Amino acid sequence: MILNVLSSSFLVTVSVAALTVTAAETPLSPAAAFFPSPWADGGGEWAEAYAKARAFVANLTVTEKVNLTTGTGWEADRCIGMTGSVPRLGFRGFCLEDGPLGVRYTDHNSAFPAGINVAATFSRDLMRRRGEAMGEEFNGKGIDVQLGPVAGPLGRVPQGGRNWEGFSPDPYLTGVAMAETVRGIQSRGVIACAKHYILNEQEHYRNRMDVQIDDRTMHELYLWPFADAVRAGVGSVMCSYNKIHGDYACENGWTNNYLLKNELNFQGFVMSDWGAQHTTLGSALGGLDMAMPGDGGRPPYGALWGGALTEAVLKGEVPQWRLDDMVVRIMAAYYKVRTGNYTTRPEINFSAWTKYAVGPLYSASNQTYTVVNEFVDVQAGHGKLIREIGAKSVVLLKNENSILPLKRPASIAVIGEDAQDTPGGPNACPERNCTKGTLAMGYGSGTADYPYLISPATAVKLQAASDNTVFTNISGNWDLDAAKATASNASVAIVFVMAHAGENFITIDGNAGDRNNLTLWNGGDELIKAVASVNPNTIVVLHTVGPVIIEYAKQHPNISAILWAGLPGQETGNGLVDVLYGKVNPQGRSPFTWGKSVEDYGAKLTFQASNPLAPSQTFNEGIFIDYRYFDKAGIEPTYSFGSGLSYTSFSYLDINVLVQSPTTYTAASGLTSPAPTYGTLDRTAAANMAPAGFKRISPYVYPWLVNNSSLFAVNGTSISPTAGVNGTAQPLLPAGGAPGGNPGLYDVIYTVSAVIKNTGKLAGTEIPQLYVQLGGKDNAFGVLRGFDEVALEANEQKTVTFNLTRRDISNWNSSSQNWEITNKEKFVFIGSSALAIRLNSTLPAPPALNW
Ligand SMILES: *[C@@H]1O[C@H](CO)[C@@H](O)[C@H](O)[C@H]1NC(C)=O
Ligand SMILES: *[C@@H]1O[C@H](CO)[C@@H](O)[C@H](O)[C@H]1NC(C)=O
Ligand SMILES: *[C@@H]1O[C@H](CO)[C@@H](O)[C@H](O)[C@H]1NC(C)=O
Ligand SMILES: *[C@@H]1O[C@H](CO)[C@@H](O)[C@H](O)[C@H]1NC(C)=O
Ligand SMILES: *[C@@H]1O[C@H](CO)[C@@H](O)[C@H](O)[C@H]1NC(C)=O
Ligand SMILES: *[C@@H]1O[C@H](CO)[C@@H](O)[C@H](O)[C@H]1NC(C)=O
Ligand SMILES: *[C@@H]1O[C@H](CO)[C@@H](O)[C@H](O)[C@H]1NC(C)=O
Ligand SMILES: *[C@@H]1O[C@H](CO)[C@@H](O)[C@H](O)[C@H]1NC(C)=O
Ligand SMILES: *[C@@H]1O[C@H](CO)[C@@H](O)[C@H](O)[C@H]1NC(C)=O
Ligand SMILES: *[C@@H]1O[C@H](CO)[C@@H](O)[C@H](O)[C@H]1NC(C)=O
Ligand SMILES: *[C@@H]1O[C@H](CO)[C@@H](O)[C@H](O)[C@H]1NC(C)=O
Ligand SMILES: *[C@@H]1O[C@H](CO)[C@@H](O)[C@H](O)[C@H]1NC(C)=O
């Protein structure tokens, strides 16, 4: 899209308020400005939870507090992660469990569509309902914290192994999905966890990659969806494995203290990714609140926290207020979600470490054999929702000669291993660590076991039987002659192909998490070409974790239809059949751009670091990833971000921009209260030792000192202890003030409306998308700032309205450390994809608005 074709060149002139930061009398070094770690203020919708949390924490001893901050160790208890407990008050430790698409490591649970699929629905309603359903399942197993949803990786590079666990490389779409998912999960009594915070954009070197990024890109791209999660009240955030500007994410003053807890005013707790904690003091002062899984550290504690944190607090290296803040945040998140119908905390009724009913209560120590799995069925009919999301996430990329929807074809050939049941059952490959059978989720810790899996071949065969359609089936990818022979005899041939990716503790076919390339796996491209060479009614179904190179298929005259079905979960076959046969008119829109080569994407994944022991990476592309880069570089994609066809057609009419009357934007200013403490600090060693005769489970992390005569040295930190232990009142940041940032950022400045009309013969759902051009060369041609899901009968029309908030039309100003509406000319575009713009307008400067 080229701006200078716009008829109007009306220049938006605004006076930008001087948002200067008052210079401190003694200027702090930038590093010192990121300390101390902010203590939560517990305001707004958190107030009630904070009142309960503070009362609870005031009653705890130091070791009881430390217990709630530290995991008991890898496989020590029944959940993926479990903290210590407070037996004196009958308070069980916290049970944490993967993952973002369902309960991992158990049974009788649902396997939901992956994040990338629910993003493709562009449906806030489905995002919310998926969150609610997942929350119900976690609650039903007795889990306190669901380790999801995912906004990191965002999707800087298309090969990123875990992109599918999240939503989209567009931060606005991901932000909406984060907020809806968080609200859904937490409405069912379970704490959500926004992860992985932050810039964990690739699997290669993830444990030590040091990312360099500019402040503006951080705010406008990667931090954006986390801000939405915080605004939605997310109870926990998981810091990632990588480093940012030299410091590990789990002890990073800039990302945890300054951005998350101060600017975004995050009220919940920060937990480490498993093993992402590296020091005792650095993590405590650098904003970590809960260490997971808790073990890993030198003797005598075998942990960086636990007894080591107790020591640090007793010695004053970690102030009491910092420990108190950790525990108050954790308990506040708990009380925030345990309300309404969910005040009662269910008992844990599964073990992540065994499939049998009876097993060890303490797995790592192989002791206390008892009933650990009660096989509680938590599915509650969620299969119906899974099928609906599966169908509504299918992106119809190509549909020539109206080949779809299918109408009782005489014969149909289903071709490719990706259509088939997995030999040995759907869970035959642990954590989906293979490419056998149909692909319906990626691999690694973001998986859940399937209760059942309806393969595409099974679902198509069933439909064929009811239509008297002759069904044939080729289940392998490699016998191209057999594929051709079967395809040439069928009126319609559907080829199923896949591309897998996941977490780097698993390597499949040489792909260590990240994809090595953007072509199909298992000879998929050759299979498609072979089938298309003999059948003019070839339909291609893509089960891929992200974009693949399919320009040849787009151009191929015999390939009549292409559908991206993504990773739809347990009902994959049924959802697909709903679309193929027109029971659901496709509404899926691509949540990413389809390039013609990997180079088209600009940003590069580092497969081979020049210094593998200390790899470093600079996000030089800035905000220009995915569709923003394609447009900037003038590259035409195969299919653009937001594109997808329907079985009907829509027209767009009457764009109308209304200026609202927002209040003046006020930079947050002033000071916090001084750091509060709760309860007393009994420094005597005896008060911090295990009770006489206490029987330890070994290995197990405890909060007690091991020795009453001397305190052991703890692992140090490179940060300034003076700034880190400073409990006096601290300045608020101008862009801060409330969860999600300055409340004024969410004032509606414009409402933009348009009329969408169904001009075809079938009912269907259109996804109008609103893009804003913020002006100037530093900005993309447009950034997504609104979308809607509009269901229309044939000939029906509806007016859609988009709210544009102050944040939506602002850029980050690094020197004022605030958002600002620049005086550059701004435009708004409404379209059916990032490239198919139907309507546009300038954004007029509202008279008398004091920016
Ligand atoms: C802590 O709770 C116990 C039991 O409810 C109570 O007896 C005690 O007074 C409380 N202590 C403090 C310091 O609040
Ligand atoms: C800490 O938690 C462990 C495990 O739940 C428990 O055995 C221990 O008694 C707790 N310690 C304190 C001080 O409550
Ligand atoms: C899980 O098991 C526990 C302990 O048996 C029980 O209290 C709880 O109700 C169970 N949850 C469900 C959903 O049945
Ligand atoms: C402290 O932690 C760092 C980082 O993990 C490690 O390199 C160092 O060896 C540790 N020091 C001690 C004294 O354990
Ligand atoms: C509690 O559950 C009941 C029965 O399912 C439902 O009608 C009600 O809306 C729920 N209340 C809340 C606050 O969720
Ligand atoms: C764990 O304990 C059980 C029961 O005591 C025993 O049969 C089994 O061999 C033990 N497993 C290991 C790995 O030690
Ligand atoms: C497809 O063919 C394979 C191999 O011949 C067979 O095992 C499988 O059951 C067939 N699938 C269906 C749905 O008939
Ligand atoms: C998948 O997991 C199984 C069981 O742990 C293992 O035997 C197999 O080697 C794994 N495959 C891959 C590709 O990691
Ligand atoms: C891309 O990777 C997949 C999976 O490893 C492999 O099957 C395929 O052959 C590769 N493509 C090329 C062009 O090397
Ligand atoms: C503590 O923080 C306050 C507010 O930022 C600052 O004025 C003061 O100098 C700090 N004190 C120390 C000892 O760093
Ligand atoms: C737009 O914002 C107004 C006021 O903030 C709100 O009432 C309305 O629901 C919003 N509309 C949409 C479509 O988000
Ligand atoms: C903007 O809309 C006008 C018609 O109102 C059209 O002429 C122009 O091409 C459009 N520009 C873009 C970039 O879509």
Image (cartoon, grey):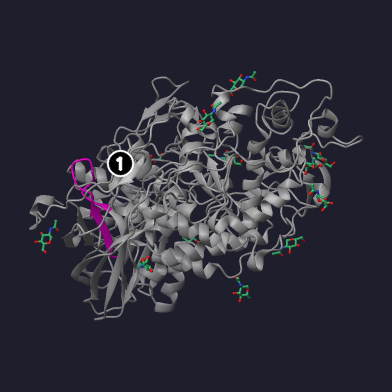
Numbered range of the magenta stretch: 767-783
Residue at 55% x, 64% y: name it: 132
Answer yes or no: is residue 368 visible.
yes
- Residue 755 x %, y %: 23, 73
The residue singled out by tag 1 in the image is 623
Q: Is residue 393 left or right of residue 674?
A: left
Q: Is residue 362 left or right of residue 115?
A: right
Residue at 67% x, 62% y: name it: 140
Q: Is residue 372 magenta?
A: no
- Residue 327 x %, y %: 66, 44
Q: Secondary structure at mark 1?
A: loop
Q: Main secondary structure of the magenta part?
A: loop
Foreground of the two, 651 or 494: 651
Q: Is residue 780 magenta?
A: yes
Q: Is mark 1 within 8 Å of ligand 12?
A: no
Above or below, 509 relative to 101:
above
Q: Residue furthest right?
A: 693
Tell me which corner region of the image, top left, top right, bottom left or bottom right, holds residue 648.
Answer: bottom left
- Residue 805 x %, y %: 33, 57
Q: Amino acid at mark 1?
A: Ile
Residue at 49% x, 58% y: name it: 181
Foreground of the two, 4 or 432: 4
- Residue 795 x %, y %: 24, 81
Decide: few, some or many residues near mark 1? Use Cα within 10 Å; few <14, some 14-19, many ≥20.
many
Answer yes or no: is residue 556 visible.
no
Residue at 78% x, 46% y: name it: 86
Q: Is residue 396 left or right of residue 574?
A: left
Foreground of the two, 630 or 624: 624
